[in-house]
Each structure stands twice: as structure tokens, then as C-alpha cells.
Amino acid sequence: MKKRFSTRRINFDLSTKFAGDSRDIGLAKCCYNVKIKNDKMICANGAVRFNWPQDIDMNTSLNVVNPPCEMQKVWKYNYKDSVSGQTRCVMFALGIDWKLYQIDLFDNNREYKLVMDKTFAKVPYYNSFVWVKKNGAMFCSDSDDLVFFEEGTTPQVATSGTKFCSICYYRERLFGLTNSDEGVLKYTKEAKLFDWSETSELGEIEIHNGKGKMRTLVPLEDGILCIGDYEVVRVDIPRVVSMYSTNRILESGNKIYANTVVKVKDKIYFLTQDGLYYTDGYEVKKISLGFEQMIEGIEQKYAVSEAYEGKLYLALKMDFGEYDESVNNALIEINLEEQTYCITKGLDIKCLLAVCDKGASRLVMLIKDNVSVYQLTDDGTFSGNILQKYFESVEIDLDMPGKDKMLAEMYISANQSVEIKVCSDSGERTYLCNMFEQNSKYYCKLSGKKFCLCLSGKVDLLALKNVELVFRVKND
């Protein structure tokens, strides 16, 4: 006699990889504040007050003094002190008062000092470089005078001449983009680094950009990459600059977010409206990470990125199925070599900066509406508060999408208390699994055509492996 029901047992190996179009069991439809390590779901990243070694021996670290006001953006500048001969590690910071501050991280006082009595009209573009074995740095915008530093932190201001919205140093010349000539890359014709006066004759390279504007410049080994709103143009520049050549390597209908352009090792990454791309300077490729549906249709004008310890970090806006007023409600950490990633929710980040000097390294963060400066941690907390952890699986239909089924039983081993919710298209059940339960059995008796599993909690470890679901399927 034929059995009325058949049994299907599913071993649910949890993975924080997003499913995308895949329906593999265990992949995530949505998850945040968790990582998978040694078959365990553990806490992901967090943030604490920015601290830095007390001295170059790095025996102890002290919290860096809070700035005098909330900061909008921070930048790093290393230079060689002309008196002591030592390399100094300085952080520049733009306050909400639109003034520029600096802090020497190895100075005993570690206090923010006003750089100059100048108020910026907008957040400037920043570039630091080495020129004739000297360290230089520049701030520019299409609304502000050019401010530059040459081997120190005493500013010089070019009160006349062209105003640039982006600038870079390449082969002893400065190259810049302007808003007035959107399709032109301008450069100093003579090898005079800071000669940008009104009488200076600037060379021009025709980029012939399409719609939108050119936004940022990235120097390459043998040229410059010009990145605009909807295109990427490579400019090959030999020693004789006038013999340049251009090559448009990307022309897209999806907007490129200039603040996410970042170089990681030998590749340049950037976010667009339809996902993450990278280029080696010759061709552009897209990275399919699987969570594109969570950023689809979201304007990312405040998204920022940074490279830190070989990984790519993106602060951006994601759809978690709830309304919030965050600038960027998520931080994505991407391990580019392993193609793994995790999402941190609960940090409203508006700026990221990798600071590395004399063996010390930090990923610095600015948090919206917060005077304190923070740094990345791996303890899953924000200022001592545990971030809520969440995992929602991809839908399970046993490859029988229209067939009625029943989730009869669930077996799970947990080493901490965790709330588990099983859902179907006709209902849901919620269970609190107590810590140190081994292969505990739960009777679900939940009917439906498709199912998913949700875990949430605030403890470090959500659940061990060996999650097993037992289904009863009615035979035809």
C-alpha cells in the first residue's frame, strides 16, 4: 500500500552569503550583524571610541580627544617634520562649522587644532602625494580657493586662479577637473607644483564626456583614470603630455557614486545604481555579491567606501524592510580574496578612513549626529551596546513550489539563547532555544507551500550547526 506522506529531512547549514537568484538551502535572504566562523554564527563588526597607541612602542592605547564639534569628514596626511626629521601622522578633519582642524596622532596632547581661519563653502576634495621626495596635500572645490600643504601642516592658499572640483598628482604635474569645462582635464604645463595663478598657462586634455559630469581622478602607473557620473575614461599620458590618448572603458546608464571610488591593491572599485564594479584600468567588471536586491532602487548619494587591511568597506543605504532616517544604515565588509562579506546594521556612518602608521592601524568612522570619532571593532557592539543580530533564510519549497507541505519537526543545537521563527505562506511559529541545548526537538506542525527560517538574538553566538528541518509531503 502506498504511503500517504513522504518525509524529507533538510540539513540547514547556515551561511551569511546572500542567495541572490540561488535557492540553495541555508543561504541568506537578509542577514546582519553576524558572520560564519568555524560553522558557528558569531557576532560581526561594531564600533568604539577612536583610540591610538600612547607611543610608537604601542604598549598602551588611549582614547583620542573628542573634536570641538561634530566632524563631517576626515583625511590622513603623513609628512616628514623638518625639525625632528620624524614622520608625523596627522589627521585633518572638517567640522560642521566648515573649518579645518588637524590632530597629530603621536602628539602627547592629541588635541584637535584649528588649521587656519578659513571657512569652506562645501566639503572639499582631498589629495595627498609625494613630490620630489616631499609630502604634499591639497584641498580643492569649485567654490573654494585651493589650499595646499608642502612637507608640513602650515597651509598655503592660492587666492587666484582656476578652481577645481577634483585634483591629482602625476609625474610632477598637477591634473584637475573643473565644473566650467566638464569635458576637459587640465594640467600644469611646467613642472611647477603649486603654480595655479591666473597667469599660469594650463594644458588641456579633451575627455569628451557624455551625460553628467566628471567627478574624480585616480592616478595609474601610466596614466589617469577619470570617473564621471556615467562613464570611466582612461587617459594614457607619456612623458610628452601632448601625445596623450584616451579610451572610454565604461559608458553606463547607471549612475556612478564618486564617493565610493577606492583603490584596493591593484584594482579600483566603485558603486553604481546597479551594484559594485571594479577596474584594472583597462576593462570594467561587475561583482555579483547576491544582496543587490537590498539596494535596488535606493539613491546612494551619501555612500562612502574605504580599503582597510586588504578588505573593502562600504557604508550605504540598504532595504531592511523598515523605515529609518539614517544617512547610511549599513556597513558592508567585503573580503575580496575569499568573496565573502558581512553586513553591520546600527551604525549610521557618514565617513570612513583607514589610518595606518608605525605598525598601528585603525578604520576610523564618523557617525551621524555624534561628536565622538569611532573605529571599527569585531565585537558586535556600538559604544558598549550589543547590536541586534538577525538571519533570514531564502525560501524553501523542496523544489515543489505549488505543492502543499508540512514542517513537522525541527532539531537544533544552540550554545546561547536564540529566538527562532519558522514561517510559511500560511503562518509562523516562534521558539526560544535555550543555551547549550544539543539536538533538541521542536514540534512545528506548520503547513504551507514555501517556508523560511529566521534567527535573532543579541548574544555573541546565535547557533551552532546541525539545524535540521523535517517535512511531511503528501504523495500524489
Image: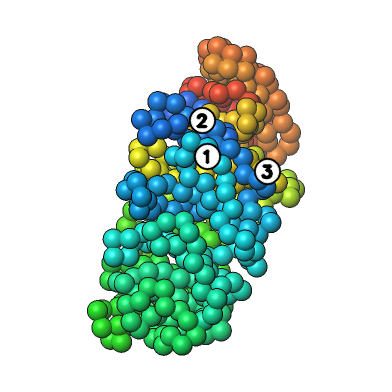
Q: Badge 2: how crowded within 10 Å, few (<14), some, or many (20+)?
A: few
Q: Position of residue 423 (x, y in %)?
A: 67, 33
Q: CA distance from mark 1 to mark 2?
A: 10 Å
Q: CA distance from mark 1 to mark 3?
A: 19 Å
> How many badges with numbers are in the image?
3
Q: Which residue is mark 3?
A: 370
Instruction: Give the side of residue 243 with respect to residue 398, left or right.
Output: left
Q: Which mark is residue 110?
A: 1
Q: Which mark is residue 62?
A: 2
Q: CA distance from mark 3 to mark 2?
A: 19 Å
Report the mark closest to the observer, 1 or 2.
Answer: 1
Label 2 is placed on what type of residue?
Leu
**Circle 3: element type:** loop
Residue at (49, 85) in percent of width and height: 198
| Marks 1 and 3 in Cβ contact (< 8 Å) | no
| Marks 3 and 2 in Cβ contact (< 8 Å) | no
Furthest-left residue in this view: 239
- Looking at the image, is mark 1 or mark 3 earlier in the sequence? 1
| Marks 1 and 2 in Cβ contact (< 8 Å) | yes
Which quadrant does the N terminus fall into? top right
